[in-house]
Amino acid sequence: MSRAARIEARGWGWRHAGRRAWALKGLDLRIDAGERVLLLAPSGAGKSTLLAGLAGLLDPQGGGEAAGDLLVDGTPAERMRDRSGILFQDPDSQLVMGRCGDDVAFGLENRCVPTPEIWPRVEEALGSVGFSYPIGHPTHALSGGEKQRLALAGTLVLRPGLLLLDEPTANLDPGGAVLIGRVLAEVLARTDATMLLVEHRVAEAVGLVDRVVVLEAGGGVVADGPPDRIFAAHGERLADAGVWVPDRPLPSPVRRPRPAPTDMIRAERLGFRYPGTDRWALRDTDVSLRGGEALAIVGPNGSGKSTLALLLAGLLRPAAGTARAAAGLASSTDDGADLWRWPARDLVARAGTVFQDPEHQFLARSVEEELMLGPIRIGLDRGEARRRARELLERLHLAPLAKANPFTLSGGEKRRLSVATALATAPPVLVLDEPTFGQDRRTAGELLELLGSLRDAGHALCVVSHDLPFVDRLADRRLVLRAGMPEER
């Protein structure tokens, strides 16, 4: 492990290309070598931007604009890239090789580590994060949580003096999150590395840090000090601003009178096998989605949750069994039809989907245009499509970003946009994969209330989530998957 790095920001700020507002501005911050800091802020307040800047990944020549100084060991951060290791919020943006072992080795090879040292370090890093596959396993066959573990291994294998972690447990099941916490504790115990951690599981993260720094949206530091003192003095105010703080759970959504549940989708003996392999992602699954109910699909990473969601949304063709429209969803012409056979126009009108990776569903040049695509596709005129788009922009706190390119949003903003695109057509069935990923406390509460109102109005909700407090407040039923097999409760 490299010696610990020192961080300093002097009036530093960054404005992303094409944006009027600064992601951060006027930031003054010093982090001494060896400190472990938890960085908190509302969604979109610049946490990920600061980490990217410290990793030397922001270049004004790409169209952005910088102000002030951002230094690592007294040198501009872009000239100190070899001192840092960063774990991005989205693991897909970090994985570059076709095989898992090669991906972890990639950074070592780029830093010219002697060949005899590389593979022992790769094996050590993979073992430290509980990665269960051999080094030759294909990266494309991993679940989101498994990709997160692999990306973390690729960061830790570098043994950096500055460890920059952006939501390291966001895609992990609760057991996986506990394991990663232990891994980080062990890494920090045997090294003097400086760590800057962004994490929404705040109660679990507090034990890893000795300092909390809270940022204000578009501004600088609003609170800084030991965790106990910060949360005791500012906890209520921070929670009201959208910052996750310990011991302040989300309130349950208002429960309204609901219609009697009606079957919308029925799946029987459903199964899916990865193309070109004998490996089953899902087997022998019976489940129904009912209007006026919320079903939560939960279970460990790699257990088939996202695969089941895509099958229920009609976006994958089953390798076994059926997923069909029931009376509450089908018209007289397609009652009982396999969902994967439906034309896209029918599917988008009746089954909205939020993918695990929101970027997989963005098509337009601006946030507002993205929200108008679905309504126009189902036959609404542009005026009504724009009205729906603007209503959702306000409800989900995206209005200031209406003209921004969707791909330039923060991780939490992309997730809210992907949820909004599914809501824009007002479909009777909604299938949402990790809808609270990257959300601050305020926007998670808004999503909870919005989805609760849709459920109570008779929509069928299917939510894949590791966010068990969110599931507890929304779901009427749970389907637990383990190794591709169900156990409903």
Image: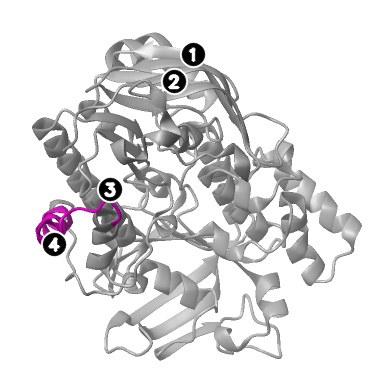
Query: Residue 390, image x and y in percent?
Result: 78, 46
Point out the tag, 3 or 2, that comes first from the N-terminus. Answer: 3
The residue pinned by badge 3 equals 155
Query: Residue 39, image x and y in percent?
Result: 39, 27
Location of the N terminus by quadrant is top left
| Category of crowding for the residue at label 2, using alpha-carbon neighbours closer than 10 angstroms: few (below 14), some (14–19), many (at least 20) | many
The residue pinned by badge 1 equals 222
Point out the tag, 3 or 1, that comes first from the N-terminus. Answer: 3
Measure how far apart labels 3 and 4 are at the Cα level.
15 Å
Point out the tag, 4 or 2, that comes first from the N-terminus. Answer: 4
Measure how far apart labels 1 and 4 are at the Cα level.
44 Å
Helix, strand or loop at mark 2? strand
In the picture, residue 140 is in which quadrant? bottom left
Helix, strand or loop at mark 4? helix
The residue pinned by badge 2 equals 214
Nearest the viewer among 452 and 51 is 51
Which residues fall within the magenta stretch?
110-127
Say which amino acid is labelled 2.
Val
Q: Nearer the viewer, mark 3 or mark 1?
A: 3
Residue appearing at x 54%, y 23% in the figure: 241
Query: Residue 260, image x and y in percent?
Result: 57, 63
Q: Nearer the viewer, mark 4 or mark 2?
A: 4
Residue appearing at x 19%, y 29% in the figure: 3
Measure how far apart labels 3 and 2 are at the Cα level.
25 Å
The residue pinned by badge 4 equals 119
Q: Nearer the viewer, mark 1 or mark 4?
A: 4
